[in-house]
Image (cartoon, rainbow, N blue to C red):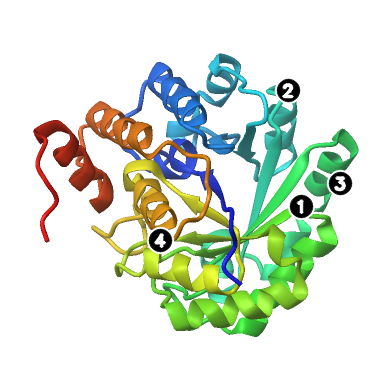
Amino acid sequence: MIPAKVKIVEVGPRDGLQNEKEFVPTETKIELVNRLARAGIVNVEATSFVSPKWVPQMADANAVMSGIERRPGTIYSVLTPNMRGFEGALEAQADEIVIFGAASEAFSQKNINCSIAESVARFEPVALAAKEAGIRLRGSVSCALGCPYQGEVSVASVLDVVERFKALGCDEIDIADTIGVGTPKRTREVMAAASKAFPRERLSGHFHDTYGQAVGNVYASLLEGIEIFHASVAGLGGCPYAKGATGNVATEDVVYLLNGLGIETGIDLDELIEIGDFISRAIGKTSSSRAGRALLTRKRDGAAACV
């Protein structure tokens, strides 16, 4: 059941950087996207077309999209919360737009003051416009493995949002553990159920590492035949609902796992490690990738691996 090949969707430039308090220079963001694509990442979540009032870090979305080198065969994705965002994405020639909806009613009400059904319905014109323009559409189901307000989220609630995104015509659907509380057993249950509602090969796992379970959840998903995963170089990002917690699983850690399993990714791990070091230095933080830190130290010190 474990796939022979996996696609990594790199979310560092968008999901990883969006909560940084200090503005990351546009040139740095452009270099990050370009280097990731050159390292073999075939799908990069480059930026977000949202109001600068709510996400100041993404205020340079147009400049980022116009400044990157378009690598043939690479999908450049952007988050679009509404029609205004879609129009920006269309003008910027994005290859894929991303919409989102929570599997938790409590989360939906607390964050956007409406029900799950209402939140997804708001994306109907965006989805229709994307289809008419021939742009790929991806839906992200947040809080699929747990909610900061209501706690446990039922599998039925996850499937409800999956079905709604399917009806909108989504090309891919992400099962996202937004607060990183998921465990491998629960992950397998949710992925197995979602695979019955939507084509397995177009489902993806988006795991946060708040409780150190993200790599385990990737492996659990592999056992269910999932072959698309989201990750963030150097583990960029944080969880606003768990103070001090790490955010997205590090791309280096995921690729290290996949390499060890003999699964093809097309990604140059050595180059990825250097990219993680580059962006960590650029924002003045230590990489959250354990594999990245260990391999970089070994590479630069020439030290042998411990047994």
Sequence-wise first label, 4 or 3: 3
Residue furthest to the right: 132
Residue 91: assigned label: 2
Sequence-wise first label, 3 or 1: 3
The secondary structure type at the circle numbered 4 is: loop
C-alpha span from label 4 to label 1: 23 Å
| Contact, mark 4 vs mark 2 (Cβ under 8 Å) | no
Sequence-wise first label, 4 or 1: 1
- In this orientation, which residue lies closer to the viewer: 263 or 196? 263
C-alpha span from label 4 to label 3: 30 Å
- Whole-percent x and y of residue 232? 41, 46
Query: At 75% across and 62% down in the image, what residue appears?
Result: 165
- 261 to the left or right of 105: left
Q: Which residue is mark 1?
A: 171
Sequence-wise first label, 2 or 3: 2
- Whole-percent x and y of residue 291? 26, 50
The secondary structure type at the circle numbered 3 is: helix
Sequence-wise first label, 4 or 2: 2
Q: Is residue 101 above or below residue 273?
A: below
C-alpha span from label 4 to label 2: 31 Å
> For mark 1, does the 10 Å Cα neighbourhood hold few (<14), some (14 to 19), or many (20 or more) residues?
some
The secondary structure type at the circle numbered 1 is: loop
Q: Which residue is mark 3?
A: 128
Indicate which label's residue lies in the foreground, 2 or 1. 1
- Please state, as top left, top right, bottom left or bottom right, where the N terminus lies in the image: bottom right
- 80 to the left or right of 142: right
- In this orientation, which residue lies closer to the viewer: 180 or 42? 42
Indicate which label's residue lies in the foreground, 4 or 3. 4
Q: Is residue 67 above or below residue 78?
A: above
Q: Which residue is mark 4?
A: 208
